[in-house]
Amino acid sequence: MFFFDSNCWLDSQSYCLSSSLYTDQEKQERICIIKKILDDNNLSKTVLTSRLARDYDWDIGNKKLLNSRLSETIEGLYYGFVLTPDVYFTYHFDDFIKDAYRNKVRLFRFFPKSQLFYLNDYYMKKILKTLSACKFPIMLDLKQLDITGNKYFDIGTLEDVLENNKDLPLILETTLKQCMFSRFYFPLLERFENLYLEVSGMLLYDQIEGYVEKFGSERLIFGTNYPGLPIEINTNRIILADISEQDRKNIAYENMNNIIGGIEVG
């Protein structure tokens, strides 16, 4: 079985790829390590996001991710860009999207709590409307909606985003702990067909099976959260799930592949 990993991270061990302090041979050795990890786990397609873009500076991290040139040497590798509202006035956003797509960006990710902005920010509304028109997928970590730190999730704002951007594929990332707060997002899954769940946090017994039974396998997106979690945990979870073979294929590969295949960038 082949997998399309929507949630893979470029960590500090690979920052050498965009640095002039390392030789071409050292960079090539690192690329070979990354390629072997993907091949050994049957990750035929992968969206790679920079931790530097999330934890330090979105723009610098995204540029260094592109400078790694990994997509030029590893077949099936795409990039995920971290964005903040600043992107709308830092760049001409329509051109930014087109350039990103040409550079193999296939996912935009938002971390409003960590990077100190609101989803209903004036510029965020413009960003989301533009991405919806392009059917360009985004990923949002559920805990980034915990605006008080006391497990009070700003689900109302998420509901508004989905209601006002119905062509926007929105993938909600949930950890094992966050899945315990499913009562917050279950009603949204029932109402909005453009809402999906990334599965790397679904590690409980019968959890994936329960989601498939309730919402169908087409709403689940495969991800590993590597290197935060070993890849094998999530690949084996799908392989061993008590669901049909077609449901496994949908989750492992087809759903994410169909989403990025639907992007409409002129």
Image: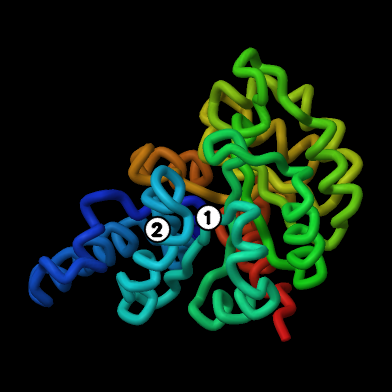
Q: Is residue 6 visible?
A: yes
How far apart in space, not on screen, are marks 1 and 2 (Cα)? 8 Å
Q: Residue furthest front?
A: 89
- Residue 25 lies in what quarter of the image? bottom left
Residue 84 higher or lower than 45, as above or below = above
157 horizontally vs 137: left or right:
right
Q: In the rendering, at what x and y percent does residue 35 appear?
A: 28, 66
37 horizontally vs 132: left or right:
left
Q: Which residue position is annotated with label 2?
A: 61
Q: In the rendering, at what x and y percent does residue 22 appear?
A: 11, 67
Q: Amino acid at mark 1?
A: Val
Q: Which residue position is annotated with label 1?
A: 82
Q: In the rendering, at what x and y percent does residue 122 appear?
A: 78, 51
Disc 1 packing (10 Å; few <14; some 14–19; many ≥20)? many
| Residue at 40% in and 58% down | 61
Protein image colouring: rainbow
| Mark identifier at residue 258 | none
Q: In the rendering, at what x and y percent does residue 18 appear?
A: 26, 68
Check contact, mark 1 vs mark 2: CB within 8 A.
Answer: yes
Q: Residue furthest bottom?
A: 266
Query: Circle 2 sits in a helix, a strand or a loop, which is it?
Result: helix
Residue placed most toward the observer, 86 or 169: 86
Query: Circle 1 sits in a helix, a strand or a loop, which is it?
Result: strand
Quarter of the picture containing the C terminus is: bottom right
- Residue 49 lies in what quarter of the image? bottom left
| Residue at 52% in and 29% down | 203
| Dot placed on the residue nearer the N-terminal end, 1 or 2 | 2
Q: Amino acid at mark 2?
A: Gly
| Residue at 49% in and 79% down | 103
Residue placed most toward the observer, 118 or 201: 118
Q: Is residue 8 visible?
A: no
Disc 2 packing (10 Å; few <14; some 14–19; many ≥20)? many
